[in-house]
């Protein structure tokens, strides 16, 4: 405003070109325009400054040389490299004449450093480093301090060292730089953004994801407060955020960050800019891993290649980085010669640029080359290149670096295919043990959604181990126990993590932490309401669902990290099958079901079920293979459901689902079963046996999410609840007149809760009953941990949405149906009226309690939850994780035991 009103409109029209202050004003004006993304105006201001320096002084004056440097800086930013080169050559020619004058050295240093930046972009790393060394020597030999700009040398060196893999030098320089900037400019200075981004990128390269995310968060906070999200100055921060998201497998969020960065870059710099090309290449790669259309991905990569090749040449390292992504896509499409060509060219570019210094960038090229040979089934060559990559990662990082661990996994598969099972076992076990470390290190810094994405990047290797282990049990006696232990580590990992966070917070004495947790719950509730609003309502209420969702996730991350501080010692103990054995009493057995895809070069369609069981006898786990896994999940499961729905005798399910276990295990009073896959969807105890009875008549089967719970529960002290019971039944589904009532009343459920209330009162329990209009969603959400919570109503589960329904959805409805916890729930007061207005938007108004909302209920002292409603056991089955539905929600909310139904329930 000051520049516009005072200078542009008044002073600028009158000030003489030779005025003593004009140069300084124009340079400040250009900087302002650059900071506010008004690049053409910045170009104009610097052109005027250059002309003013020429007129007032002459072509050989140091101030004219300084203006040439300023022009070059902006030209580099705009991608005008030829012009920048010309400007810098002219500038340095002038300023070299003043190198012995103390007060002029700052201008020479500035020009040398700017040229180093340009040389780095061109991939001329040796020349760039020479320039920066010279600048540092000029600064150190100066008779008096040259000024705060000496820190820029450090910043540029750090950026260069990152590209060259000189990480220890970089970290030291960046930390010093950040400390100096904080001291001089304060902790929120915009000058901190660039070194913070570089430090975050360094942490990411070192595999320190949590630290990288923390640093990126600080840079983002500063950037948003100064520039706003759409500024080009935020692009490096968004790209760092996206790279972190990509590393943990969160591809949707990564793509969103990359796209935002590219949009701001393209708007200001035009499409044919190298920064746009780099963003295009990143977006193409995440779209590839998301499974998007190959034609679109190839088009984006070709565009990025053309921009890089045209602007920087085809011998530039940044062009090589695009070639690597091109190779990834071509490997997947089995275009192996094209992939080889891209990788050979990329390796040659980096080798020519780095010479004998060593090249960290070669590691990923060797790994990809190994991938090509592996897919071609040339295993000896794949092994050779994987080992080359492994050696580089170990040299530059450590044996616990995520990329090193991925190479171990690749080598394990190579050795498996070569039938070298001993080496395969050694490599994959080292990788899985490192994953255990990663889970402990990185999970606390992630939200539940991010944990699920990150876990997806690892779980395939645990699945591969099952193929290796169960095929080699006779040769390696320790494998059965190791598979069982890995199940204890990973099964229901995400559910266990969610429950832990809640328990730690509720049991802590930190009221600030509890308050933060309650704030998070309120924000989640607000978010579900916001997602139910129309676009017009969102605008009217000034609500941005994306920003609100990001805020909720940020709070969740903070809570997860803080709750880790309250972890109890037993939580960090590695639990083994021996611990489970010692938790079992006489007449008890623990069974871990394992579902996995058979591995043969890649994962096949063949599905295998294995039951592993232990008794309190100090023996290794026993293994039972259950045949025909694919049929179990399709034909046999369909038969099981049809028998129940059609009320016809089931003469087959016992034979395929339970008899293989019963024959091997024998009769036990109590069987603790941790199900997997299709076993999450069947009620084993209700299956008829050949003698006319049911499984329950011979076996008491107790379902647990993971058999390690048997050990953990003995160590935990659970707060005692008074004998209170809260019951809901027969909600009044319609509060308005309607001729088309699709939801039937449930008078039988009112009788159910009334009789239950009388029974409990006779036993001295304190009871609360809510029926008809009092059986509301608000009343359920106001529960305060009754010992028993019984609800009798309609339940629902919405499976996959049809194409026709998807086309008719609003954007907010489509977003809601993506979350499995919003696709299942319980109908309460007013639910009928709500379903008259919407088919999928269950939070449009009160009436339906979704599983997502049920997770936030206060059931920390609740021993039993009874869901006397249709299909409350259904949901989206995630192998190794259980069912994403009401059962998961109530367990996270604190319930100890659940009773529910997988079928329709007669009133």
Image (cartoon, helix red, strand yellow):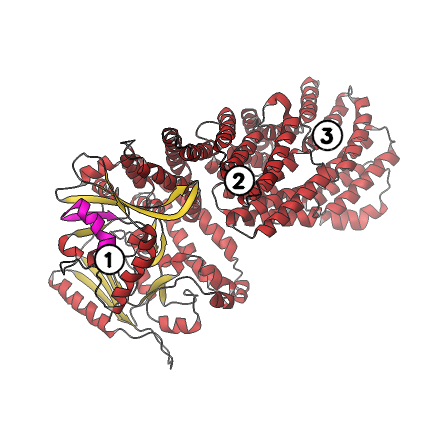
User: Can residue 902 be seen from the camera position used here?
Assistant: no
Q: Is residue 587 left or right of residue 334?
A: left
Residue 755 position in % (x across, y down): 16, 68
Residue 455 position in % (x across, y down): 41, 43
Give the secondary structure at mark 2: helix
Q: Sequence-wise, which precedes: disc 1 or disc 2? A: 2
What numbered label is drawn on residue 696? none
Q: Sequence-wise, which precedes: disc 3 or disc 2? A: 3
Span shown in magenta: 655-674
* 3D distance between C-alphas at marks 3 and 2: 28 Å
Q: Is residue 72 left or right of residue 396?
A: right
Quickly name the residue at label 1.
Answer: 653
Quickly name the residue at label 2.
Answer: 216
Q: Is residue 762 left or right of residue 217?
A: left
* 3D distance between C-alphas at marks 3 and 1: 76 Å
Q: Residue at x 23, y 38 (%)?
A: 621
Q: Are marks 3 and 1 in contact (CB under 8 Å)?
A: no
In the displayed structure, 654 sits above or below 418; it is below
* Pair 1/2: label in front: 1
Quickly name the residue at label 3.
Answer: 115
């Amino acid at each position: 405003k000051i520049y516009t009103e005072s200078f542009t409109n008044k002073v600028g029209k009158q000030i003489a070109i030779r005025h003593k202050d004009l140069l300084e004003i124009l340079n400040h004006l250009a900087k302002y325009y650059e900071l506010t993304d008004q690049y053409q105006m910045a170009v104009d201001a610097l052109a005027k400054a250059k002309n003013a320096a020429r007129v007032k002084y002459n072509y050989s004056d140091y101030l004219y040389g300084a203006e040439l440097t300023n022009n070059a800086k902006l030209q580099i930013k705009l991608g005008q490299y030829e012009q920048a080169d010309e400007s810098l050559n002219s500038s340095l020619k002038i300023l070299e004449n003043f190198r012995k004058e103390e007060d002029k050295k700052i201008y020479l240093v500035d020009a040398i450093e700017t040229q180093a930046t340009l040389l780095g972009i061109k991939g001329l790393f040796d020349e760039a480093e020479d320039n920066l060394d010279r600048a540092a020597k000029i600064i150190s030999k100066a008779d008096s301090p040259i000024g705060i700009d000496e820190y820029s040398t450090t910043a540029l060196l750090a950026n260069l060292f990152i590209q060259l893999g000189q990480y220890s030098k970089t970290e030291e320089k960046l930390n010093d730089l950040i400390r100096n900037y904080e001291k001089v400019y304060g902790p929120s200075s915009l000058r901190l953004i660039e070194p913070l981004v570089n430090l975050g990128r360094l942490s990411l390269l070192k595999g320190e994801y949590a630290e990288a995310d923390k640093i990126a968060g600080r840079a983002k906070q500063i950037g948003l407060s100064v520039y706003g999200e759409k500024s080009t100055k935020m692009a490096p921060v968004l790209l760092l955020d996206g790279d972190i998201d990509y590393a943990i497998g969160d591809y949707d969020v990564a793509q969103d960050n990359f796209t935002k960065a590219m949009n701001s870059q393209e708007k200001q710099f035009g499409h044919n800019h190298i920064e746009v090309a780099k963003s295009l290449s990143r977006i193409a790669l995440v779209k590839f891993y998301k499974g998007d259309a190959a034609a679109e991905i190839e088009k984006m990569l070709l565009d990025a290649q053309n921009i890089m090749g045209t602007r920087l040449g085809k011998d530039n390292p940044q062009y090589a980085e695009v070639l690597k992504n091109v190779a990834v896509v071509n490997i997947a499409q089995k275009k192996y010669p094209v992939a080889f060509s891209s990788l050979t060219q990329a390796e040659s570019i980096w080798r020519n640029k780095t010479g004998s210094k060593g090249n960290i960038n070669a590691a990923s090229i060797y790994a990809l080359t190994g991938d090509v040979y592996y897919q071609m089934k040339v295993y000896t060559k794949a092994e050779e290149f994987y080992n080359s990559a492994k050696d580089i990662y170990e040299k530059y990082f450590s044996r616990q670096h995520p990329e090193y661990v991925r190479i171990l996994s690749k080598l394990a598969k190579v050795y498996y295919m070569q039938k070298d099972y001993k080496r395969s076992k050694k490599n994959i076990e080292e990788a899985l043990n490192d994953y255990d470390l990663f889970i402990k290190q990185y999970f606390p810094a992630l939200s539940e959604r991010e944990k699920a994405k990150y876990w997806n990047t690892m779980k395939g290797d645990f699945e591969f181990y099952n193929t290796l282990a169960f095929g080699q049990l006779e040769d390696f006696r320790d494998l059965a126990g190791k598979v069982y232990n890995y199940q204890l580590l990973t099964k229901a990992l995400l559910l266990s993590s969610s429950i832990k966070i809640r328990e730690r917070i509720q049991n802590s004495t930190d009221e600030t932490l509890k308050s933060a947790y309650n704030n998070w719950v309120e924000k989640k509730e607000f978010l579900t309401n916001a997602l139910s609003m129309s676009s017009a309502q969102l605008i009217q209420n000034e609500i941005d669902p994306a920003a609100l969702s990001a805020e909720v996730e940020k709070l969740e991350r903070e809570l997860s990290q803080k709750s880790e501080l309250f972890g109890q010692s037993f939580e960090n103990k590695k639990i083994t099958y021996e611990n489970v054995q010692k938790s079992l009493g006489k007449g008890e057995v623990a069974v871990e079901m394992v579902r996995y895809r058979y591995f043969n070069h890649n994962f096949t369609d063949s599905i295998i079920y294995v039951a592993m069981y232990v008794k309190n006898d100090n023996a290794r786990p026993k293994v039972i293979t259950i045949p025909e896994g694919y049929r179990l999940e399709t034909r046999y499961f369909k038969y099981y459901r049809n028998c129940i729905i059609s009320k016809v005798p089931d003469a087959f399910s016992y034979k395929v689902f339970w008899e293989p276990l019963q024959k091997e295990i024998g009769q036990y009073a109590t069987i603790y079963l941790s199900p997997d896959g299709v076993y999450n969807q069947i009620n084993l105890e209700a299956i008829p046996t050949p003698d006319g009875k049911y499984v329950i008549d011979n076996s008491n089967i107790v379902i647990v999410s993971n058999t390690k719970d048997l050990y953990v529960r003995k160590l935990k002290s659970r707060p005692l609840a008074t004998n209170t019971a809260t019951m809901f039944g027969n909600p009044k589904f319609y509060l308005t007149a309607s001729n088309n009532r699709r939801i039937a009343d449930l008078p039988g459920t009112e009788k159910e809760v009334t009789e239950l209330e009388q029974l409990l009162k006779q036993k001295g329990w304190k009871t609360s009953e809510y029926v008809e209009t009092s059986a509301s969603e608000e009343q359920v959400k106001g529960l305060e941990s009754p010992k028993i919570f019984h609800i009798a109503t309609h339940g629902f589960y919405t499976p996959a949405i049809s194409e026709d329904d998807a086309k008719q959805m609003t954007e907010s409805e489509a977003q809601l149906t993506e979350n499995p916890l919003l696709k299942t729930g319980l109908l309460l007061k007013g639910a009928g009226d709500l379903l008259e207005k919407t088919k999928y938007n269950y939070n449009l108004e009160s009436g339906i309690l979704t599983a997502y909302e049920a997770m936030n209920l206060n059931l920390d002292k609740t021993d039993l939850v009874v869901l006397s409603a249709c299909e409350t056991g259904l949901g989206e089955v995630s192998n190794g994780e259980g069912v994403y539905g009401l059962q998961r929600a109530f367990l996270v909310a604190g319930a100890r035991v659940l009773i529910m139904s997988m079928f329709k329930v007669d009133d």
